[in-house]
Amino acid sequence: MNSFEFLQKLDGISPEFIEESLGTDISEHAAVPQIFAAVGSAETVRSTDPPDIKAKRGILHTAVSYISLAACLVVAVGAAFLFHNLHGHNTDLLESSTPDPAETTQPLVTVTALQTDLAQQSETTHSTVTYTQITSVVSDAEFTADSSLGTLNITELSADNTLPERTEATDAVISGNETETADTPDEQTETETAAETTVETTAEITTAASETEAPEQTTENTEATTSAPETTHSEPHKQITPGLGDLDGDGLITEADTAILYCTIARESCNGKRFISEELFPRADFNQDGNVTYADQICATRYIALYWYIGYRNLSVEKYIADLNMYNQLYLMSVQDLPPEFGDLWQEAAFVLTINESAVSNTSELTYETRCEESEAALQTVRDEYQNML
Amino acid sequence: MDDASIIALYFARDEHAIRETADRFGPACMTNAMRILGCREEAEECVNDTYFELWRTIPPQRPEHLTAFILTIVRHLAMNRIKHKQAKKRGGGSVQLALEELDNILPAEDDVQGQTEKNLTAEAINRFLATLPKDQRIIFLRRYWHFQSAKEIASALGLTESNVRVTLMRLRTKLKEYLEKEDLL
């Protein structure tokens, strides 16, 4: 009797015990992850959610971020339009998308005046401006679409009714996803650049400004991102090598392919000889970064984990490569809450991965032969385990 | 609507029974199926199969504990799906198909033996659970029957996660000793 059979046999447990374990209220156990409940919430990904829900939450979060950005831009234009009507004169705010640092005080003063007017009229923040008002000035959106200055000012306006003077420090605070001040010059530069150039970060400005507390879950995601070994960025519709990762030519990407990939990389680095044919060699560049390294093997192993073990059967290699960072995070989150029947199996898979990662970090004292043997042994254990579970 | 009324609808072959079941138990069924299958689409299919199975089995059965009855069906169907998926994972296509075809015609000798063994194990586990304090029994079932994570259990019962993990580890050891004593391992 293996662990899976044991778990199946638990079906025969007394119903009294089952009801006792449920507690008095059945609704307590009805915590079905509602993906749409995440809309408008800072907590978009929960570690206890199943992997596919996490992925959907991530997509929704991105969508909400884009919508927030669009609303923010439209409100910025709306505010500018109102200001034009109220004061009857044009300013340089909308004319220059890249203002001279020497002239930055002028728009700030302008928006301060605008903010005062808005406060006098309705005492509302940008988030409560009606959609009718917004749509009336949509045509002006292009003026401020590239203006980080306008976006930042409106964001500050929404946070409270006083417009702080624009400094490097305030930029850093506003640009960050959390309300912490960036400590280092590098962080400031990075966050400011992100606010000016990326859509998603700008959208997050709105979140950070409208919510006084930083979303806790973001920290977890950041940690997950940090530990991901890949550096390839998301590039949808990227053309990849045909048969990528399928080094044994069986049409599937399995542990056998990672074993071949491992041997290829190890032998290449050891004596410069090819383990596989020249025709197949391009397929070994799994992360499509132009080099065949241990990163490719980790990348392939994680794909196999997601596809075979976690059950993402719709995950094509193209999709995986296009959103490598996202799937890295997904993998790391998925490993956290494994069903018990996968426990032993995953230990073996994790062992394979550990060997790969130790090879990458080059801290392992194992010889080439020993690594190959251990890797093969681990893979064989995984295969045997599968056979037992059939 | 209470359990008795829902069962009465099933006995009257009233299709509203399914709707009432879905309203009352749907979310819990979905949660359990999701925990096991990890895929929303499959979980939805599993829950729909559960409703069909309920419609098929009530009557003649009249479950005393409707909640446990329904969740047991969900769990059973979900576990079968997992088993089926694993069989198909690696080259199981034709072999699995052949096995399924033979399953339909082979005498039920193995089934009887397997069912007896299953019943014996289940009875032994029931006896084992009866010996446990209530809080430990709940932790065990939430983990291995409902497949809740240690974090979820800790949150629901007001315990620390490490406390739950340690308790589960001790329970596993106890269970192993108990099953060995009963000659089931």
Image (cartoon, coloured by chain):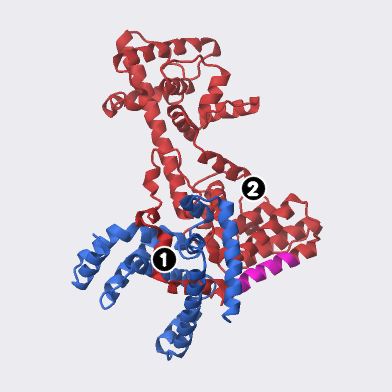
Chain colours: A red, B blue
Mark 2 residue crowding within 10 angstroms, few (<14) / some (14–19) / many (20+): some
Can residue A242 be spotted in the picture?
A: no
Output the chain of dot 2: A
Q: CA distance from mark 2 to mark 1?
A: 43 Å
The structure residue drawn at horizontal position 30% and vertical position 71%, both measured from the top left corner, is B54
Query: Which amino acid type is shown beneath numbered disc 1?
Result: Ile
User: Where residue A93 appears, x then y in whole percent?
Assistant: 43, 15
The structure residue drawn at horizontal position 28% and vertical position 62%, both measured from the top left corner, is B21
Where disc 1 sits, the SS reads: helix
A94 within the magenta span:
no
- Can you say which quadrant of the picture contains the N terminus of chain A? bottom right
Q: Which residues are magenta?
A: A373-385
The structure residue drawn at horizontal position 56% and vertical position 26%, both measured from the top left corner, is A192
In the picture shown, does residue B100 fall above or below A112? below
Q: Is residue A175 left or right of residue B19?
A: right
A381 within the magenta span:
yes
Q: Where is mark 2, residue-wise?
A: A229
